[in-house]
Image (tube, grey):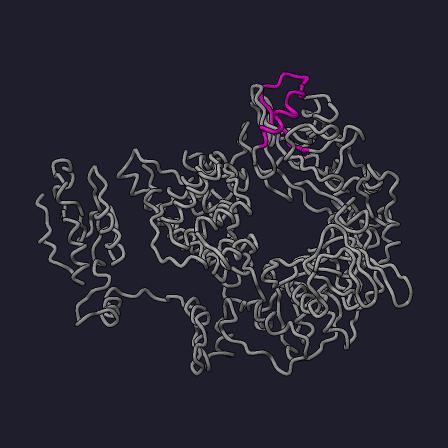
């Protein structure tokens, strides 16, 4: 028997709902913490009563962390799941169309809206986990339909909604897996960051091996997270001068670990997925070591080897996914490139320096082209040598280079521990190529709601005459602009947008648009569109757009409101960046404008630029790409003389530099370090450790970044400071409250004069309340009598004065279990401390035998019916009426 059979899935679904609607990370964390406290308490009680039961938390955790659960694949892709749901729900007409046409991320919510049933859920955690297990093991349509139908008929609409999200691995709880695992064990989060494998982490915790596992314990067939490289910038030139570094070519493949023990091989991806079945057939038979190897773990990249070209091909050159290779293509095959050895013949080498690990790797095998190869690290002498090595890599069309400290240990999951990646696009636009392209199309995040353009199809131009242009699709870009910029751009583009109707050539007022295979959701008329400055590191062969090559790794550098559409890059300029000598064997091309020089590693002084009064506001808000150090001309002085310290921002909000710019545009002064009695407030989005110190020391008021964005990200100068209330602060000093708010608000932010306008406002006020003194039992009692009494009879928290222990018989008693829940709900405490005056042992009179419990002879033993009857009567029954003689 598993205690997961006693945990209701509906309770878990409620926690999920709380998390997605929570307004802060701390709220989500608190909801999850309370839930796990209840689960772990219940687990302990259950195992005390059923010591032979199954106490594993794995069933629960792989539902909560379904996005990171690698053991199960359900075989329910989006289309198949839609079809099954329509059949199971027996929907037709508009409802069926809604399910068929909605975005994948919205399927669960659409189903929830369609289901009208108010039935209560009978599902336990074990029920859901077992059904998903069956779906994973037996992927026949009939079995999947049967299991989903069973879940639907026994669960509520809310339950089915979250089961769908679990199947699609689309939870979006906005709380990290590591944070959730910390609720189970203090080391749970760190273990997951190290091993990235849920069942492994749970096994360590439940076997009491968590502390040992945090040491550099490594063994074959237990994957760990890969060590990562941090971005190398020109500001790190001191590293080159002071440290011994080795250079490796940056591979363009999939990160993998190769594990072998006693002749058995396994291959794990970066996310700990097991691809052994695939690569044991394609690679393992060809691997030969030149020394005796009983067990080994190698870190490396799985590459695609082209047997005809006799070289590795990049992801951009082929649509082949090396992870999905099922047989050896007549000219393509997987090839494992090892660059580190972590374990050999029973010995862990992660705590050995890199240069020593590589010497061991070099001795293990001779390279076998197209099967198993290794990198060739080269020691960097100085900056000039690094420049030479990097330029050589670019000339050979490599993605970049990796620099590794000779003394670096292997640190699973760590990024800033001695490995550095270096690519051309990490330098400025004097080194890499930027393209000014016009937006000709858009792709909605959800084509049915059309709320926001997620990515933009870009075009280059060819002038036919002064009044007529051809515009050719050249690529797609999505990243590089933030929420406010994206919204403003969306509103501007909609003014010249029309639905795409399927043509490859589209006429517009000033010419024609030529599209490729990939079609946008909407077409933007180029002569009324906007130009984006796009930075790319490579051009790659593509059949998706009109041009033979397209962008690889593009990002938006800026929105060029200062450029007209016909000043965009021409197709001739774009085609000059590549030459097609061999149409069949095209390869990815680097598009850097020049090699780097030693001077690129020195940091020049920042240039200061003055923005004109006329353009300052529009360019600052619409472009959001200026450095906060610029000498900005204010558009008003509503914040003149007020000093702010901008500390952090939040996801989907402007960056810290952008927030500083907004403040400067309204005349504010800025400081990097807040000063007592001089700095008005510290601006914060996410709460970091420094913010917590300010709050704990009560030295500075912490202003929410939302107030700044809500009131200042507009296109007009302001006449006065926008309304500011205590609810706009995370924390207020006593001085701030006394000087600015005491006359109009209480200390929780509740106005003395204005009514509360919304539930959200009420919740903010309640969340601000902190109990400053312990309320006495008598005060609580008097309050409850006033609020909850019926004819003066106490009927709420009636068991508060009692502490109790529940002792069950050999057979599980659901009614008694329910009485225990009622006891807790109405104020009773579950305890094992019998020293208290009002301590009770609750038992089932029908099955309890005092002879089996000699240790209870002096205890107050009461039949559990006392609880249920007292609850029914809305007051305490006489306790002695239920006393069992001991």
Decide: is 744 above or below 314: below
Decide: is 522 above or below 635: above
Residue 61 placement (x, y as % from top left)? 44, 43
Visible in this render: residue 403?
A: no
The N terminus: image quadrant: top left
Residue at horizontal 72%, vertical 21%? 366
Q: Would residue 734 appear left or right of 348 to someone viewing this image? A: left
Compare residues 257 and 782 and report the one nearer the observer.
257
* Residue 808 drawn in magenta: no
Q: Would residue 642 appear left or right of 884 to someone viewing this image? A: right
Q: Quadrant of residue 459?
A: bottom right
Identify the magenta region.
275-302
Compare residues 860 and 874 and report the one nearer the observer.
874
Decide: is 500 above or below 60: below
* Residue 295 drawn in magenta: yes
Residue 291 placement (x, y as % from top left)? 66, 17
Residue 758 placement (x, y as % from top left)? 45, 73
The C terminus: image quadrant: top left
View extreme (front): residue = 93
Decide: is 470 above or below 221: below
Visible in this render: residue 423?
A: yes
Q: Quadrant of residue 226?
A: top right
Residue at horizontal 72%, vertical 27%? 373
Residue 108 placement (x, y as % from top left)? 49, 53
Residue at horizontal 17%, vertical 50%? 864
All told, the count of numbered labels is: 0
């Amino acid at each position: 028997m598993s205690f997961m059979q006693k945990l209701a899935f509906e309770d878990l679904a409620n926690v999920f709902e709380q998390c997605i609607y929570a307004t802060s990370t701390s709220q989500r964390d608190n909801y999850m913490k309370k839930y796990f406290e209840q689960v772990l308490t219940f687990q302990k009680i259950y195992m005390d009563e059923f010591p032979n039961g199954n106490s594993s938390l794995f069933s629960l955790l792989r539902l909560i962390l379904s996005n990171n659960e690698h053991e199960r694949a359900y075989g329910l892709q989006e289309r198949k799941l839609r079809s099954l749901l329509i059949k199971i729900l027996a929907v037709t007409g508009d409802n069926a169309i809604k399910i068929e046409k909605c975005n994948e991320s919205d399927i669960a919510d659409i189903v929830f809206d369609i289901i009208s049933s108010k039935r209560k859920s009978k599902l336990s955690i074990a029920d859901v986990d077992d059904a998903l297990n069956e779906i994973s093991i037996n992927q026949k349509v009939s079995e999947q339909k049967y299991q989903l139908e069973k879940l639907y008929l026994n669960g509520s609409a809310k339950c089915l909604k979250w089961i769908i999200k679990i199947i699609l691995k689309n939870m979006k709880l906005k709380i990290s897996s590591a944070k959730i695992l910390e609720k189970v064990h203090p080391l749970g989060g760190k273990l997951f960051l190290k091993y990235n494998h849920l069942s492994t982490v749970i096994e360590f915790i439940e076997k009491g091996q968590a502390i040992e596992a945090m040491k550099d314990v490594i063994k074959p067939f237990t994957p760990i997270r890969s060590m990562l490289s941090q971005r190398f910038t020109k500001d790190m030139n001191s590293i080159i001068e002071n440290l011994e570094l080795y250079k490796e070519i940056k591979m363009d493949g999939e990160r993998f670990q190769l594990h072998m023990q006693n002749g058995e091989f396994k291959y794990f991806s970066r996310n700990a997925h097991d691809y052994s079945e695939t690569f044991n057939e394609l690679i393992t038979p060809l691997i030969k070591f030149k020394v005796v190897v009983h067990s080994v773990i190698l870190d490396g990249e799985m590459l695609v080897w082209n047997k005809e070209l006799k070289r590795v091909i990049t992801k951009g050159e082929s649509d082949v996914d090396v992870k999905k290779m099922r047989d050896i293509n007549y000219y393509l095959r997987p090839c494992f490139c090892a660059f580190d050895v972590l374990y050999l013949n029973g010995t862990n080498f992660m705590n050995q320096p890199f240069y020593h690990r590589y010497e061991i790797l070099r001795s293990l095998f001779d390279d076998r082209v197209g099967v198993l190869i290794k990198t060739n690290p080269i020691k960097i002498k100085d900056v000039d040598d690094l420049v030479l090595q990097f330029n050589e890599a670019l000339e050979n069309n490599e993605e970049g280079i990796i620099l590794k400290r000779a003394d670096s240990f292997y640190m699973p999951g760590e990024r800033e521990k001695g490995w550095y990646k270096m690519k051309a696009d990490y330098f400025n636009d004097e080194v890499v190529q930027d393209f000014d392209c016009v937006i000709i199309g858009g792709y909605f995040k959800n084509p049915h709601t059309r709320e926001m353009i997620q990515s933009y199809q870009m075009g280059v131009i060819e002038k036919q005459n002064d009044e007529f242009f051809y515009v050719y699709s050249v690529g797609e870009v999505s990243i590089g602009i933030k929420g406010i910029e994206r919204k403003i751009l969306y509103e501007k583009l909609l003014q010249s947008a029309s639905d795409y109707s399927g043509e490859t050539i589209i006429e517009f007022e000033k010419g024609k648009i030529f599209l490729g295979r990939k079609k946008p959701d909407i077409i933007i008329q180029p002569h009324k569109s906007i130009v984006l400055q796009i930075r790319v590191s490579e051009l790659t062969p593509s059949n998706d757009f009109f041009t033979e090559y397209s962008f690889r790794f593009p990002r938006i550098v800026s929105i060029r409101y200062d450029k007209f559409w016909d000043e965009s890059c021409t197709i001739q300029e774009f085609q000059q960046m590549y030459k097609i000598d061999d149409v069949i064997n095209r390869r990815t091309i680097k598009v850097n404008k020049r090699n780097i020089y030693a001077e690129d590693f020195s940091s020049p002084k920042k240039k200061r630029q003055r923005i004109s009064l006329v353009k300052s506001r529009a360019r600052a808000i619409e472009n959001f790409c200026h450095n906060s150090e610029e000498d900005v001309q204010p558009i008003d002085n509503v914040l003149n003389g007020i000093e702010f310290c901008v500390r952090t921002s939040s996801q989907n909000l402007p960056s810290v530099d952008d927030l500083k710019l907004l403040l400067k545009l309204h005349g504010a002064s800025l400081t990097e370090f807040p000063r007592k009695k001089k700095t008005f407030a510290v601006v914060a989005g996410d709460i970091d450790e420094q913010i917590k110190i300010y709050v704990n020391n009560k030295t500075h008021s912490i202003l929410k970044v939302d107030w700044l964005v809500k009131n200042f990200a507009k296109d007009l100068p302001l006449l006065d400071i926008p309304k500011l209330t205590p609810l706009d602060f995370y924390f207020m000093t006593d001085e701030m409250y006394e000087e600015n708010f005491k006359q109009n608000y209480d200390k929780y932010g509740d106005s003395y004069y204005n009514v509360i306008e919304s539930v959200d406002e009420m919740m903010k006020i309640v969340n601000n309340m902190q109990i400053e003194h312990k309320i006495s039992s008598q005060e609580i009692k008097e309050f409850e009598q006033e609020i909850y009494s019926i004819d003066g009879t106490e009927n709420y928290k009636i068991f508060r004065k009692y502490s109790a222990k529940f002792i069950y018989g050999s057979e599980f008693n659901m009614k008694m279990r329910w009485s225990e829940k009622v006891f807790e709900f109405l104020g009773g405490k579950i305890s094992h401390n019998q020293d208290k005056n009002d301590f009770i042992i609750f038992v089932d009179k029908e099955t309890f035998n005092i002879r089996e419990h000699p240790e209870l002879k002096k205890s107050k033993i009461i039949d559990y019916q006392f609880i249920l009857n007292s609850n029914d009567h809305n007051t305490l029954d006489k306790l002695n009426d239920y006393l069992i003689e001991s």
